[in-house]
């Protein structure tokens, strides 16, 4: 596992790793190693959407078909980024193959071919869907004339000084990439899960230190206006009883005078936890390369130490 801690009002950062980044050959997990972060990618996509909306490049109230024609009719970009669109998640239907290479249009088409109708009226319910965030990425590319990857580099990676965070579009091995494992005895899934199927919904790679810096920059108020950040971190409506509240690309847990905002992610055995605690302004990132891991229980211990409760 890897863990990183950072603070809104300080440039101090703590990062540590334990165990192995790969089993064969046995390799120590180093703090500078890169991990696939899965759905924590959605926080980057959501932040991009908020930026472009404030610039007037698009509107959260735009119907998705304005920017991505010949797809689903009815849901708005806001309903996509809040997971209230009614659009099925492409990787939940029809035996979706995560080992092959995928393009964004292919993933959307896969979902449409298997469930062309919305699962519920837009805005009526909450249901997690990766298709929402693929469509958001496609909409932002159309609105800006830039690729999703270019937008990430220009808006976030460059300004924040990130050198190891990137969009992963293939299953190619990399000496700096932490390998992922599933089952018992562990099976290496790194080269059999193609991260292209994540893209704007879950295709990013990062390090513990860069990802915790991202959490502080986003939720600590460095990147977005107060209005946009408030909108992103305010619950968008009711969620199922077993589900935390959800804003715009952000999970929200409130209670006892504290609020946790952030996202988790999982892809092919890699798990990531990236959350920010208010009002203390503390960010915690955890990464694991063999799932399942009880990030909630582990994070509770960490936050108690940090806020001295």
Image (tube, rainbow, N blue to C red):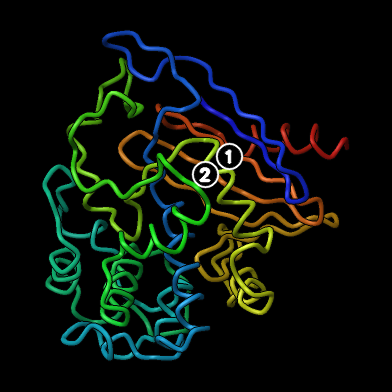
Q: Which mark is residue 285?
A: 1
Front one among 275 and 187: 275
Relative image position of residue 146 (x, y in whole percent): 27, 71
Coordinates of residue 252 in the picture (x, y in percent): 64, 61
| Badge 2 element | helix
In this view, the mark in front (2 or 1): 2
Which of 7 and 234 lies nearest the eye of the viewer? 7
Please give the residue where the numbered disc 2 appears in the rendered image: 211
* 169 with respect to 289 (left or right): left
Q: Residue 121 location, x and y as percent?
A: 38, 86
Q: Earlier in the sequence, mark 2 or mark 1?
A: 2
Indicate the secondary structure of the residue bearing disc 1. Answer: strand
Q: Is residue 183 above or below residue 49?
A: above
Q: Is 239 or 143 nearer to us in this picture? A: 143
Task: Kindly identify the residue that appears in the image at 53 percent across and 52 percent down.
Answer: 160
Q: Using residue 68 as the reference point, say whether residue 161 is left or right of it.
A: right
In the rendered view, tell whether residue 262 sits above or below residue 187: below
Q: Is residue 247 left or right of residue 306?
A: left
Q: CA distance from mark 2 to mark 1?
A: 7 Å
Could you tell me residue 32's position as x and y percent? 46, 28
Q: Residues within 10 Å of mark 1 (few under 14, many from 20)?
A: many
Measuring 59% from the left and 71% from the top, which residue is drawn there?
232
Q: Quadrant of the C terminus?
A: top right
């Amino acid at each position: 596992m890897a863990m990183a801690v950072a603070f809104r009002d300080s440039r101090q950062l703590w990062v540590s790793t334990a165990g192995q980044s790969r089993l064969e050959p046995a390799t120590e997990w180093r703090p500078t190693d890169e991990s696939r972060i899965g759905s924590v990618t959605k926080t980057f996509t959501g932040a991009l959407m908020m930026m472009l909306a404030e610039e007037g490049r698009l509107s959260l109230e735009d119907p998705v078909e304005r920017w991505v024609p010949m797809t689903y009719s009815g849901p708005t970009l806001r309903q996509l980024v809040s997971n209230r669109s009614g659009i099925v998640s492409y990787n939940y239907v029809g035996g979706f193959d995560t080992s092959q290479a995928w393009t964004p249009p292919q993933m959307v088409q896969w979902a449409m071919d298997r469930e062309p109708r919305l699962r519920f009226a837009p805005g009526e319910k909450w249901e997690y869907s990766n298709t929402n965030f693929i469509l958001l990425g496609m909409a932002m590319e159309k609105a800006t004339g830039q690729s999703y990857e270019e937008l990430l580099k220009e808006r976030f990676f460059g300004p924040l000084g990130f050198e190891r965070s990137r969009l992963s579009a293939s299953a190619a091995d990399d000496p700096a990439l932490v390998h992922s494992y599933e089952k018992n005895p562990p099976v290496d899934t790194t080269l059999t899960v193609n991260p292209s199927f994540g893209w704007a919904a879950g295709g990013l790679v990062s390090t513990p230190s860069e990802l915790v810096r991202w959490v502080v920059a986003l939720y600590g108020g460095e990147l977005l206006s107060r209005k946009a950040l408030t909108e992103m971190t305010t619950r968008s409506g009711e969620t199922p009883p077993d589900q935390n509240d959800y804003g715009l690309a952000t999970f929200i847990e409130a209670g006892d005078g504290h609020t946790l905002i952030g996202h988790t992610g999982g892809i092919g055995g890699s798990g990531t936890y990236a959350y920010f605690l208010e009002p203390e302004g503390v960010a915690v990132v955890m990464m694991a390369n063999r799932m399942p891991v009880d990030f909630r229980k582990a994070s509770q211990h960490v936050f108690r130490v940090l806020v001295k409760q």
